[in-house]
Amino acid sequence: MAVKGIIIKGQYYDSVTLMLVAQEATKLEGVEDVAVVMGTVQNKSILRSSGLLLDEFKDAVDSELLIAVKAGDEKDCEEGIKKVQELLTARKAASEESAEYSPKSIDGALKILPNANMAIISVAGKYAAIEAMNALKRGLHVMIFSDNVPKEKAFEVKRYGREHGLLVMGPGCGTAIINGAPLGFANAVNRGDIGIVSAAGTGLQEVSCIISNAGGGISQAIGTGGIDVKKDYQGMSFLTGLEALIDDPETKVITLISKPPDPEVLEKIGEVLKKTNKPVVASFLGANPKLVKEIGGISVNDLEHAALFAVSISKGVSMGDFEKEIEQRDAELKDKASELAKNLKVKQKYFRGLFQGGTLAYETQVLLKNIIGKVNSNVPLDPSLKLEDSWNSVGHTVVDLGEDEFTVGRPHPQIDYELRNKRILAEAKDPSVAIIYLDVVIGYGTNPNPTGKLVPVIKKAKETSDAIIITTVIGTDKDPQNKAYLMSMLKDAGAVVFERNASATRLAGYILKGLGG
Amino acid sequence: MKANELFKQKLEVINVGLHSFKESLDKTGFEALDVDWKPSAGGDVEIVEMLDKFEEIKQKIDVDGANKEALNRLLSSKPKLIGMGKAIDVIPGMKKNMILHAGPPITWERMCGPMRGAVIGALIYEGLAKDEKQAEEIASSGEIEYSPCHHHQAVGPMAGIISPSMSVYIVENETYGNRSFSAMNDEGFVKSLRMGVFSPDVIDRLRWMEKVFYPALDRAIRFLSSVDLKIIIAQALQMGDEAHSRHKASTSLLFRIIAPAIVRTTHDPLEVEQVLKSIDGNDYTFLNLSMTAAKASLDAARNIDGSTMVVAMARNGTEFGIQVSGLGDEWFTVPAEIPPNALYFAGFTKEDANPDIGDSSITETSGLGGFALVASPTFIQFIGGTPQDAINKTLSMYEITLGENNVYQLPFLNFRGTPTGIDIKLVLEKGISPFIDTAIAYKKPGIGLIGAGFAIVPMEVFKKAMPAFIKKYS
């Protein structure tokens, strides 16, 4: 048995704190007794009676802190003393009372939440990069929701993340699911073994929802923002995300989603893919499937197929069975299309897609192009198809209501339904419209009451128009909005209701094709 | 890769911007904390440019290292009361015709009312003038040299007047050997010299202090050899003091230490009674010691090349000034403001208030006072706040300080150390200005204390210091 101790000068602690520290240190293996007291006469007499009054303590004064440890051997004593010192310096910064305090900076927040590992940044673009850098330098991963981040700043942030192995999701990243947590606009999906890297926001939502609804699950869904796969940014966020999924033991299948990446970026993705045997399903909307195959990925045409195929692999369903299922589904769609087309009048020829989700607007154009040809848009596949005026549809039209011209001074259309509702009623008055096509994105961050916002408008549109109204709902049963109720109410209002944009778009395409395109 | 470590950890999110993103995480059971964000430097373009230049300097010199050293010196200082003496005998640079005052340098012409009142009182006390009129003549004649306490290792509350015959505390920083000084607190909560009152009772009390109080204290301190001020302050913070505007606990602790020594060394029982009653009856007895301890600790952190830590914040009732460790003895000053948030005694309003005055903000500079507000729920109540306000005010000061105190702890924040070491860069970057607990004096001489409240350090003073730093180190 050994007793050792030290004197610390110039530090004061109240006796309760000291008792708690002593109690905690006594739990150490090999330690039998611990005393941590200020050197008052009274305390010294207590130490004496417990055999802990070391010679050097005898002249100690009130202002000196005495630490004494009795243990099996000297080494254990020293461990005990070290532990006491650690406990004394340990600070429990986040008291319950401080919960009401809002820190003014990331630094301040870290003092309250010292283990924070992610920052979501949604302040104005010119400040977003500064805050992102603040977070990265403190070792946090970041999601930058903000758009309009100055180019060189965005590059700097992404490069820092790339060099340090930190996720930089964005700028312009609207959604991600990390460790099951919905970040930004995201859905309540099942957890599982399918990992997603997506440079397309609603694309990530659509794919993760279809996967979850089809019985699969998500390990991680990493957003990068659309600009990431452009030449200027070299896919830096995308590559980091992909590498992380490759190294992640919980991820068995990887799904990549993007508009066609820049060729240089695609090549880099290919380089990274060489490092893995994990199956990689890639939906680079509208890209040549050959390019995907060249880099070792499995190419699929659309988001729905990307999701379903990933689920098939995850569950061990064969490619052949999967393709059979797709064909069957397509045949059903065609039957349904010819049935719906019967009710249309001769004048009704045009498609009008009014979108809350940018990726979905894009996907619909890609799919329609192959079925009915040219579609005008404010975000066209080809510059020649650019709408002269985003506010007025011409011929077949797809409008992305999340674009800047619609969101200046108002919330995103997934939150604020007013603008689209007006547009729905305007389209309903146009006798040349055959199909009004609407996506309804639900989940965290979006409007809490889509049923109340949208259903009355569809009913009203139906009163004045014979157009077919097709809706596709992006969400899961676990989302805070009641998806089942929403879908049944949409049906009651006379809409055709889908849960997958690609199928819904194909249906529209087949209807229009039946009319002679 | 770090991203893979993240996948294994519990996700904890700092949310900067849209509150709804935090709500989603709250609903799904994930830890998230909102930042009450505003643009860096409050969107002030001038400051943003300054900070950019500052970042360039940081590439060249080790500012972080310098600040670490400055903070370490402040934290490792051990101020002890070692004795007393006459100002003229012990304060470096003190002269027979010199009067020391609070805050940055000032002339008689520009002095505010309460400081003039205190100068008048000091001249009468010194026997240089027989009345107010004569004192004013002498004060404005050019015969008297005015000098900031801070230029003489000294500090003084409110007007902060120290004249040559006044008895002063001598505090020594045991770690670094430097000394600091301040006059004794001249009781009279409302009517006192420091508040600008020079009535006969105030002068009489000063004379009694010189004849009876000072010798008794001097003997007692010598008998004790020294009194560890840091330990008293640390304990007082756990007993309801914040060590700037409330000193009930520290004064009591001092009393417990010094009373037996006074009894032992002063032989006239009537004098013993007077002296003990004086200490016991003046809740502000310890104020001057608290300030002197802070001064001794901060002086040890002066002149660290490249440090952006503030080593003095002081007001003379006309101007507010700061000094910065890496910028020598240069003052950066702006006009002093009337404390915006204050409670006044019956019969007084903001109209009657003198702008912010006194060296006592040295306590905030060292991590006490407003920076330890949460330690003193009673004081926050006095100015109409709630304990939650005190928590939030103290927590916001962690954003602009270099570290946390190793000795001064806040029970209400789980014994976290007080925010310590104001960094001019952090103040500018975060757009958060230090705040100061303060008393408020009447704007003209002779009336005294009229209220108490918070003073906010004018941001402009930091905007002046930063360009000087940039210039010096470019």
Image: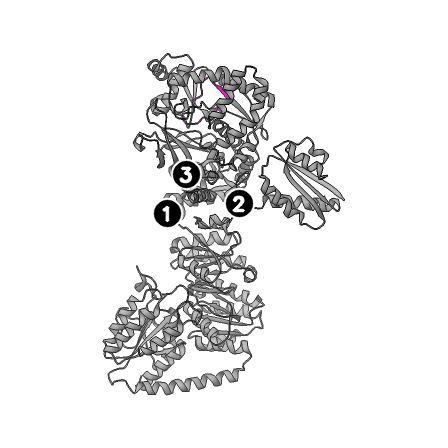
The residue range painted magenta reads B152-168
Chain designation of label 3: B
Q: Are marks 2 and 3 on the same chain?
A: yes
Q: Amino acid at mark 3?
A: Gln
Look at mark 3 in the image and give the residue it sits on: B381
Residue A422 drawn above or below residue B244: below
* Amino acid at the residue labelled 2: Asn
Q: Which residue is mark 2?
A: B414
For the N terminus of chain B, the image quarter is bottom right
User: Which class describes the residues within 10 Å of circle 1: few (<14), some (14-19), or many (20+)?
Assistant: some
Asked which quadrant contains residue A3, the reply is top right
Q: Are marks 3 and 1 in contact (CB under 8 Å)?
A: no
Q: CA distance from mark 3 to mark 1?
A: 33 Å
For the residue labelled by badge 3, is the local secondary structure a helix, a strand or a loop? helix
B37 left or right, relative to B93: left
Residue at label 1? B43
Labels 2 and 1: the sequence-earlier one: 1
- Answer above or below: position of B345 versus B144: below
Is residue B185 at least partly visible in the picture? yes
Mark 2–mark 1 CB contact (< 8 Å): no
Q: Earlier in the sequence, mark 3 or mark 1?
A: 1
Q: Main secondary structure of the magenta part?
A: loop
In the image, is residue B227 above or below residue A390? above
- Looking at the rendered image, the disc whose residue lies closer to the viewer, 2 or 3, is 3
Q: Nearer the viewer, mark 2 or mark 1?
A: 2
